[in-house]
Image: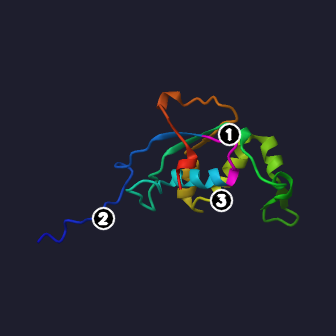
Amino acid sequence: MDTLSYKTISANKATVKKEWIVVDATDQHVGRIGSKVAKLLRGKYKPNFTPHVDCGDNVIIINADKAVLTGKKWDDRVYYSYSGYPGGQKETTPAKLKEKGEDRLFRKVVKGMLPKNKLGAQLLGNLYVYAGSKHKHEAQQPKSLDINSLK
C-alpha cells in the first residue's frame, strides 16, 4: 500500500493559473459585491487555494457608479482615519469617497476584507474599478461573471 498517494498540493507562484474576471456592479449592494470580490481576489473559490500565495484572479468592476447602499448609509456611515499626531483624526463618508473617485469606495470596502499584511496589499493591486461600462483590459480577454451566482 502506497501511503503517500494522497499528497496535499500547495500552490506557488509558478503553478497558479490567474484569470481575468469582469463583474458588473449595476444595482448591486456595495458590501455584498465587495465580499465576493475579496474572495475572488484571494482565490477562495479555487480548489487549489493556498493561504500564503496570491492564487486569486484579477477582477475588473464596471459600472461602479451604479452600485447602491441601502438606507441613509451614504451620509450616516463614517470612516475614520488617524495619522498618529494630535488632532490627526479625520472622518469621511461614502458620499465623499464617491465624489473623489468611483474606485475609492470599492477599494476601501474590499481592502477591509483582505488580510492586513503584504499579501493583502498585493491582492488589492489585482482589483480594477471603473465608473462606466468601458475598461482598458480587452486584451486580457476577461470573462464576464454574474456575482449573484457565487456564495
Outermost front residue: 149
Left or right position of 137 against 72: left
Which label belongs to residue 8? 2
Residue at screen point 70% across, 35% down:
131
- Please provide the residue range marked out in magenta: 24-31
Quarter of the figure that contains the N terminus: bottom left
Q: Amino acid at mark 3?
A: Gly
**Residue 116 coordinates in the image, percent (x, y):** 60, 62
Residue at screen point 73% across, 39% down:
66
Q: Earlier in the sequence, mark 1 or mark 3?
A: 1
Identify the residue position indicated by label 3 in the image: 112
Residue at screen point 26% across, 65% down:
7
Q: Amino acid at mark 1?
A: Thr
Looking at the rendering, which quadrant does residue 90 occupy? bottom right
Mark nearest the camera among 2 and 1 is: 1
Identify the residue position indicated by label 1 in the image: 26
Dominant SS type (magenta): loop
Element class at badge 1: loop
